[in-house]
Amino acid sequence: MTDDPSSIPPPLTPPHKGEGSVGRRAWLPIIGRNLRRIPLPPVGRGKGWGYLSRPHHRLLRRAGILSATALALAGVAVLSALALDRAFPPPLDPAPLSREVVDRDGALLRAFAAPDGRWRFAADLGRVDPRFLDMLVAYEDRRFRQLSGIDPLAILRAAGQFVANGHIVSGGSTITMQLARLIEPRSERSLWAKARQAFRAWQIERRLSKDEILARYLTLAPYGGNIEGVRAAALAWFGKEPDRLTVSEAALLVALPQSPEARRPDRHPETAAAARDRVLERMVSAGLMNEREAQRASLAGLVPDGRNLMPALAAHATEAALRAKPDAQRFQLTLKRSVQQALEGVAAAAAARLGPKLSVAMVMADARTGEIVAEVGSADFFDAARSGWVDMTRALRSPGSTLKPFIYGLAFEEGLVAQQTIIEDRPANFAGYRPRNFDMAYMGDVSVREALQLSLNVPAIRLLDALGPTRLAARFRQAGVQPALPPGEKPGLAMGLGGVGVTLRDLVQLYTGLANGGSATLLHDTPGQPVSTRILSAPANWQIVDVLSGVRPPVGAPKLGVAYKTGTSYGYRDAWSVGFDGRHVLGVWVGRPDGAAVPGLAGYDAAAPILFDAFARSGVALTPFASPPAGAIRTARADLPVTQRRFSRTPSETRAAGVVEAAPEIVYPPNGARVEVPGPEEALALKLQGGRAPFRWLANGKPVDEGSRRRTASWRPEGAGFSTLTVIDAAGRAASVRVFIE
């Protein structure tokens, strides 16, 4: 049989390098794909490349079969891996974290260990030192950003080191593989365990971004003891957040997770320092720093010799916050960390000076917003001798004389007195109630200004008797403070000297009105909108601020430009001092949490020095007092109207002396009436009944006339709106109505 040239396929030309091929190996995929389509020439016939011998013929068929088998196995492997990935996903549920309470700026106030007893915070890469991140990647996994969780070169290197040294030198694990080990810890070290880590790493890379992987690793990485994560490590070992690490500190934190117990700086300082220095050397080799910088970091950075305690500021406030929201992982308060830390230091030092069993509590608030800036519930939360666990900022106690400014404020508002009005400080009987001064002495005739500055008891009760205790209590309720009274009892005159129960927070809330032009603001320690309500008129409030700002500071205290008032409860159980500037209010309580008496304890001697020390150390800039509002002036006694030059007897005293006239009563306009005045030049008629002439009329605290024996008067309103009309008789008794002028 002769060969037909037309039936013979063209000769197979072997691929050559330089023609887009890699040599004879490139035949195999060509043959594997086209094995059955190539018309092979008869075996053994012809010569040259165009003809195959019988051995070559079998080789090509085997190569094709092997290639097809390999591709099939690879496909099965991929499908199996995907099936396993779906069937056995990696345990990526977040680990339990430490609960944290932060201040208004996000600074950590107090942390609580995770349920498993470990300190573990979620890592935020944006709040971690960038140089630390660069050093970590360069040291642990320099191809972290390029590979998909498995580094073949690192595995080969680790295998070579094992063969050469006879033991494991490095594990060849990437950061992703280390994360796989952390989320699924196993004690065994074997090839099977390493293969399982590699598979988990592949799974993790399919689900998380590189930054998410790094953040999870820095949340779970061990740093010795019960410390996990870079933030807990920075706080425990250096007492700082991880965004302010030095080069030496960053290098130590890179080295610790490899052998956290063997390199614990508090137990093995030399080992820790050596590991840190190896990291610095590697950074020089990686080009992240020069040798001089590495040497400087090694020499200057001593490893810590002990752990720092986790922040535990504002213990009472933080526990109350978490009780309010038990499921909250992170809770924010309005406190400011630096102020809180300063005031806690002042409280602890003061309690140490005062003696055992005495405690100190403080509250500082922003009068305009009502935000609590600092809150110290006791001198030491963990001091059992002082009952430190009791939050004395919320305990009901007798406020002593600290409520007196509001009595005088109402008297100023009603026009009963001015600062230079003379008032008697002598023994008095108010229908059976006989108040006495703190020092058991009396000063006779004093001005109202002096009576408040010296905190005299009898003048304050004279004014309260004229105003009525119920009216004072109503103002307190209007400001959001509910004074505590025995069940079934109504407010009485003793209220002016501390005969009610209030808390330190209540007092500070009332005093926000004095610092805020007469508008008290509700206190709150969680972010929220301010809620204010008027407690005194602006002119009357300015008079109180003017008087209290003239009180001399305690002995040895600097003059800071703050107004303040002190108080001492009956039986020397509570010492108080509340001060304010044009923006902030600070209240201080001193005493025993169990309510026992402390002989000699007084607000001026015990609490006032703490108040001034706390203001000075708080770091809060002092704000000047507001300028006097319209109509607020300090008038000399000689320029006062006749009826305001001396405050006469009050209703209770009048009855005791046998005076029979009825108290004055305004009959027109009636209280709450809406009165229409025809024109700006038209006067409104005022009428009263009862009382003893002469009478003096006041409109919004300003005199209407110089006094008259007639029971009628006229008044020209300054404009539309609410107005308060008051009449005072010769016995010092007063009556008021509130009307709306249309």
Image: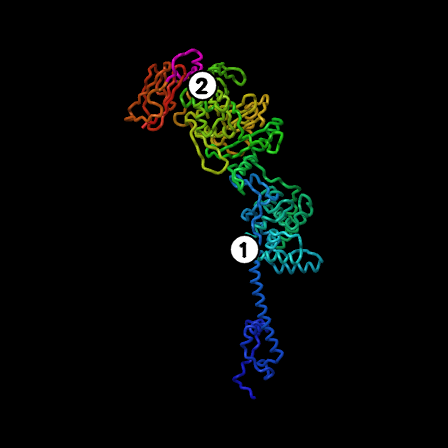
Q: Quadrant of the N terminus?
A: bottom right
The CA distance from mark 1 to mark 2 is 76 Å
- Asked which secondary structure carries label 2, the reply is helix
Magenta stretch holds residue 508: no
Q: Quadrant of residue 734?
A: top left
Disc 1 vs disc 2: Cβ atoms closer than 8 Å? no
Task: Please tell me whether residue 340 is drawn above or below residue 135 in the rendered image.
Answer: above
Q: Crowdedness of circle 2 by 10 Å Cα count: few (<14), some, many (20+)?
A: many
- Asked which secondary structure carries label 1, the reply is helix
The three-letter code of the residue at mark 2 reads Asp
Q: Nearer the viewer, residue 349 or 387?
A: 387
Q: Residue furthest right?
A: 166
Report the number of discs.
2
Magenta stretch holds residue 654: yes
Q: Position of residue 454 (x, y in %)?
A: 50, 20
Q: Which residues are magenta?
A: 641-664
Q: Residue furthest bottom?
A: 1
Numbered circle sitting on residue 713: none
Q: How is the image coloured?
A: rainbow
Numbered circle sitting on residue 465: 2
**First in sequence: mark 1 or mark 2?**
1
Q: Is residue 8 left or right of residue 248?
A: left
**Which residue position is annotated with label 1?**
207
The three-letter code of the residue at mark 1 reads Arg
Q: Residue furthest front?
A: 488
Q: Quadrant of residue 544?
A: top left
Q: Nearer the viewer, residue 654 or 290?
A: 654
Q: Position of residue 401 (x, y in %)?
A: 51, 22
